[in-house]
Amino acid sequence: MNQSNNRKIVLLIFSIVSFCNYLLAQEDKLINVYGRSEITAELGANNFLGDLGGNIGKGGPFLKDFTFKTIKPLAGFSYAYYPQNWYQLKIGFNFSSVTGADSLISATGDLARWRIYRNLSFKSSIFEAYAVGQFYPLTFFTPGYGMRRLNPFIEAGIGVFHFNPQSQLNGEWINLQPLHLEGEGFTEYADRKPYKLTQLYLPVSAGFKYYLNNRFSASGGITFRKTFTDYIDDISTTYIDPSLFDKYLSADQALLAKQLYSRSLRPDKVKPGIVKANSSNKDTYVTIFVSISMYLDKYIPFYYGGSMRRRDGSLSY
């Protein structure tokens, strides 16, 4: 990650921590959300972490290739229920997109040069459906397991997402999966199975939640996703012999595949078997989000006075 991105992220984290410390100093009441349910609207900034694009140097997993140049908006909706004060169960849906382009890498050092020469790009819409548990660890250190107005949380679960990688050719966006650009499903590449556009993923989130009043709360945080595919951007392994497209595809598809399987700035270096991407790392995408929640149980007390419910729902005085 370059110095400019580092400064921006450090400043963002510092601002969040400072704001949270201020809020904690303002309110020390305990809150009872036992048995409540809520609906949530979420907005976020989505960033792709895969083989295409990224920052200078060698491509890497996790946040090494995070770049503000490829941020895309995310919108979501969810429903949650609190079986106890210390956790909620949530189901939700998100709509977003991801993108990546080798041309966005500005430096030409040895470690990044091959990605710049590769000159590939893509975009994909993303639809997610998920079920997670959101946990509030600090409630175990409060009387009656009540929650304060500001609470850190961690969240984990399982989801399914649908993607559809596309690349632009002569001003038109072309679906890449049907073109088998790396020989997926071809006899000559028996180890490369056709990939599915709908797959499972594991979301993990961390953040803070602040209770505004008896009906509303606001949250902010970051979500990482563990996926099981390296084809969100449609590249994973090596270049293949382009004559195979004529063997396995229709004439129209073969023509498109020959134009899209390589867009290299050094076509003399493109040969069957030459590495196209790092298949050891699965693709993923990360979201920085904010959300607003509304509680549906209007008449359940927000503050429980001098008593709080225990974890089993009974009163503790």
Image: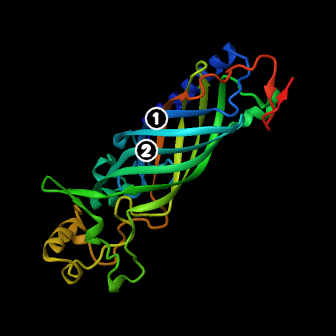
In percent of width and height, residue 278 lies at: 43, 65
In the picture, measured across the screen, residue 290 lies left or right of residue 28, that is left
In percent of width and height, residue 277 lies at: 38, 65
Q: Amino acid at mark 2?
A: Asn
Q: Which residue is mark 1?
A: 42
- The disc placed on residue 245 is none
Q: Which residue is mark 2?
A: 94
Q: Does 189 sit above or below residue 149?
A: below
Mark 2 nearby-residue class (10 Å; few <14, some 14–19, many ≥20):
some
In percent of width and height, residue 39 lies at: 52, 34
Q: Quadrant of residue 241?
A: bottom left
Q: Residue furthest top?
A: 26
Q: Amino acid at mark 1?
A: Glu
Q: Quadrant of the C terminus?
A: top right
Residue at 50% across / 44% down in the picture? 92
In the picture, measured across the screen, residue 269 lies left or right of residue 137, that is left
Q: Quadrant of residue 238?
A: bottom left
Q: Residue furthest front?
A: 299
Label 2 close to label 1 by CB (< 8 Å): yes
Secondary structure beneath dot 2 equals strand
